[in-house]
Image (spheres, rainbow, N blue to C red):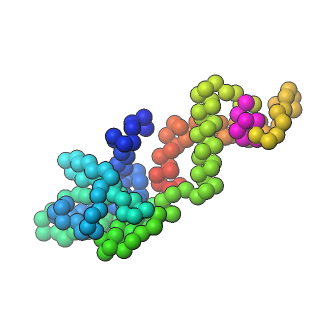
Amino acid sequence: MPDADPRRTPALWSPLASPDVVVVATRDIAAIPLPPGLEPLANESSPTEHHLVMAYGAARLRLCLRAAPSGFSDCLIIQHDRSAATRLAAATRFERVTRGIRLGPDRSASPSAYRRSRLALLLSIHDALDAGAGPRDLAFSLVFPRQHPLVGATWKGSGERRHTLRLIAEARRLANGGYRKLLRHD
């Protein structure tokens, strides 16, 4: 739920929605080998799954533990899809943690500096639209802040206007569900 307070209801993503969630099928959820002193940041259970979000140094681990049928050994489940490489990287990080190897932040699961600044711009545009700003206001306060405002026909036919309108459309798509692509690292 996007409006929920993350301190009270942290995001526990489905492995289908977020490829950095490691799915472990195990006979005994309590027997998953984790380093001593590792405390979960979030811990939630459903009838079929147990979700954990854990901090290990600067790294974050997201686990989805599922009960395996008796007679089966513990295994990692990696879905074969376009995010398979990200799923494999997350599984490798989990395996390193179970061996006690210290990890740094996962760069593959976070956007680049350019992508972060673009997302921040799109969020600012969306917030300004909600506050009642028009395209020209957005263009010369957020998109082209060092440029003098254009007026009349000059504004109407400008590349600045077309670029601002494209950014507005992208911000609206992102707010209307496009943010889910961020979880898949598209």
- Could you say where residue 122 lies in the image, as x and y percent from the top left? 61, 41
Q: Is residue 168 magenta?
A: no
Q: Nearer the viewer, residue 159 or 53?
A: 53
Q: Quadrant of the N terminus?
A: top left
Q: Position of residue 177 (x, y in %)?
A: 49, 40
**Percent coordinates x, y for residue 50 in the rendering:** 24, 53
Residue depicted at x 36% and y 74%: 101
Q: Which residue lies at the image location 37% right of the left edge and 46% below the top edge?
A: 11
Residue 141 belongs to the span the image colors magenta = yes
Q: Is residue 84 visible?
A: no
> Does residue 46 appear anywhere in the picture?
yes
Instruction: Tell me the residue at 60%/45% (across/down).
Output: 120
Tell me: 120 left or right of 150: left
Q: Could you say which is closer to the camera, residue 132 or residue 47?
A: 132
* Quadrant of res 64: bottom left
Q: Is residue 69 left or right of residue 15?
A: left
Q: Specify the segment rendered in magenta.
A: 137-144
Classify 26 as above or below 17: below
Does 141 appear above or below 60?
Answer: above
Overall secondary structure of the magenta section: helix
